[in-house]
Image: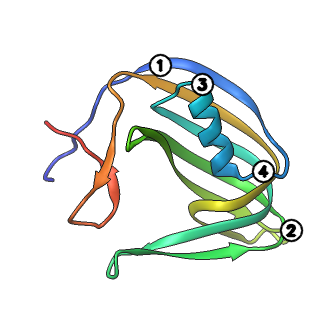
Amino acid sequence: MDKLICSEFTLGRRFVGRLPHGKDLLTSIEDFCKASSIQMATFSVIGAVSFATLGAYDQKQQVYATFTQEEPHEIVTCTGNISLMDENPVIHAHIVLGDVEGKTIGGHLFSETTIYAAEIDFQELTGKPLKRAHDPTTGLMLWTLSD
């Protein structure tokens, strides 16, 4: 890919709400998307988690290396998007967490991240939904876009 390729969307519904205590962060967002028939969106989350699973992509081996944070952390920032993969909504999110001493850690967000208390700002996008597919160059599931 030699240049930026984009799809244009218009703003759909906007949701602001509280995520459920003790539930998985990604699953909660995914369940909301399914129940609300959302295929494309962006979101941000603030709050706290009692357990987190994060990761980073090893570009040489083309796999994610994951790690857990078993103690409570504040969600300094969490941002992501929703698109389709195999006709189902899929969440792609990154998160930065802070501990009680102000030290931060971040990465790609994975399931087995338990919500302590969290608020979400969710913006639906309307238009032809982007779909994720395997990218042979990176090994990642990326949006399929064309000129």
Q: Amino acid at mark 2?
A: Val
Q: Amino acid at mark 4?
A: Lys
For the residues labelled 2 and 3, say whether their Cβ atoms are less than 8 Å apart. Answer: no
Q: Which residue is mark 4?
A: 23
Camera-near label (3 vs 1) is 3
Q: Position of residue 45 (x, y in %)?
A: 68, 43
Is tag 3's residue or tag 1's residue first in the polypeptide sequence?
1
Nearer the observer, 139 or 42: 139
Q: Say which residue appears at 28% left-offset and 31% top-offset.
A: 7
Is tag 2's residue or tag 3's residue first in the polypeptide sequence?
3
Q: CA distance from mark 3 to mark 4?
A: 18 Å
Is tag 3's residue or tag 4's residue first in the polypeptide sequence?
4
Q: CA distance from mark 1 to mark 2?
A: 37 Å
Q: CA distance from mark 3 to mark 1?
A: 15 Å
Image quadrant holding the C terminus, namely: top left
Q: Position of residue 87 (x, y in %)?
A: 39, 38
Is tag 1's residue or tag 2's residue first in the polypeptide sequence?
1
Q: Which residue is mark 2?
A: 100
Seen in the image, is 64 located left or right of residue 7? Answer: right
Label 4: how many Cα within 10 Å (few below 14, some 14–19, many 20+): some
Q: Which residue is mark 1?
A: 11
Secondary structure of residue under mark 4? loop
Q: Which residue is mark 3?
A: 36
Label 3: how many Cα within 10 Å (few below 14, some 14–19, many 20+): few
Q: Position of residue 40 (x, y in %)?
A: 45, 32
Q: Amino acid at mark 3?
A: Ser
